[in-house]
Amino acid sequence: MHLNQLNFHHLFYFWRVAKLGHLTRAALELHTSQSSVSAQIRHLEERIGEALFTREGRRLSLTDTGQLVLAYADNIFGLGQEMLGRLEGRTAGITRLRVGSVATLSRNYQENWIKPLLADPALVLTLESGLLEGLIARLVQHQLDVVLANETVPADPDRPLRCRFLGSQSISVVGPARRWKSQSLRIPEDLDGLDIALPGHRHTLRAQFDALCASAGVTPRLRAEVDDMAMLRLIARDSGWLTVLPGVVVQDELRAGTLVTVGHSTALQEHFYAITTPHQHRFEVLEHLLTGARDG
């Protein structure tokens, strides 16, 4: 079969069925009938000369040939989605940068990272937050240009990703200035029995902190555990408890003097990463951000 004999419309229908694993769901998404979807896939199989699916009850499973075709279809239609994302707004002379950020990452850190772009009148920013796996799925589908995270992703030859280290910072224990001003605590030794708010278990910092306390035989009095850094910031500001978090989360409160740092440990570190896909074409705006972060 020559390339000009490949019907990309048929290939697109196959791609959606393979992704959804179900003819009916694909038909609903494509606003057509199940029989029409089946016919399109059957035509593609006839062109290729091999079956792409086997039936397992009501579900469809990919054959070995189907797996191979899916890998190429992911690249073909992924690049199409990337192209559309880049072209969006170009007719008006606008560039769009789509940034995803894990929910456990400080919004202050995210703002600091994109700050060099805020004065660019020709740039539109799209900012999303969510769980890492969901953001990575959107990144692989070229619906995002970059994902900011505080953890890396496992290497996967079927899902090529680039993970760039942006930097790290030590973690602070902060408290209200009215109580803790001019006081200093040893971390973790002096935390035993003190009221404290911590990042939730989804946050990479939590495992570090729990291990540090366990090794020192220290048990703080847990008052709250919070996944969202914006909420943890509010608790740090309003509760009167000690709070363990990256200093960037409460940078404004520290500058204003409503919160003070009462201790920190070099054993507690948060690392920041930018996760991207291998772009076929250089994305200047994003490259400048990544280079600036690395050089800084």
Image: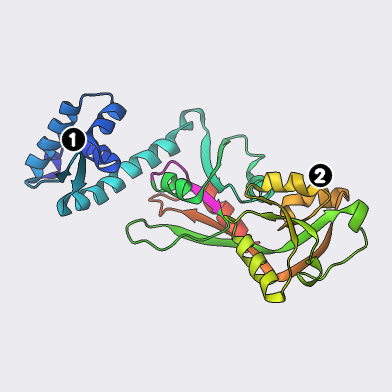
Classify 80 as above or below 89: below
Residue 146 in the magenta stretch? The answer is yes
> Which residue is label 2 attached to?
238
Q: Residues within 10 Å of mark 1 (few under 14, many from 20)?
A: some
Residue located beneath label 1 in the image: 10
- Give me the residue at 69% from left, 56% from top: 198
Residue visible at 91% across and 64% down in the picture: 183
Number of numbered callouts drawn: 2
Q: In this rendering, is residue 211 above or below 283?
A: below
How far across and down, in percent of the image, does residue 102 sit? 56, 49
Q: Is residue 271 visible?
A: no
Residue 152 percent coordinates (x, y): 51, 61
Protein image colouring? rainbow
> Closer to the camera, 221 or 179?
221
- Residue 215 position (above or below residue 28): below
- Residue appearing at x 31%, y 29% in the figure: 29
Mark in front: 2 vs 1: 2
Residue 192 seen in the current view: yes
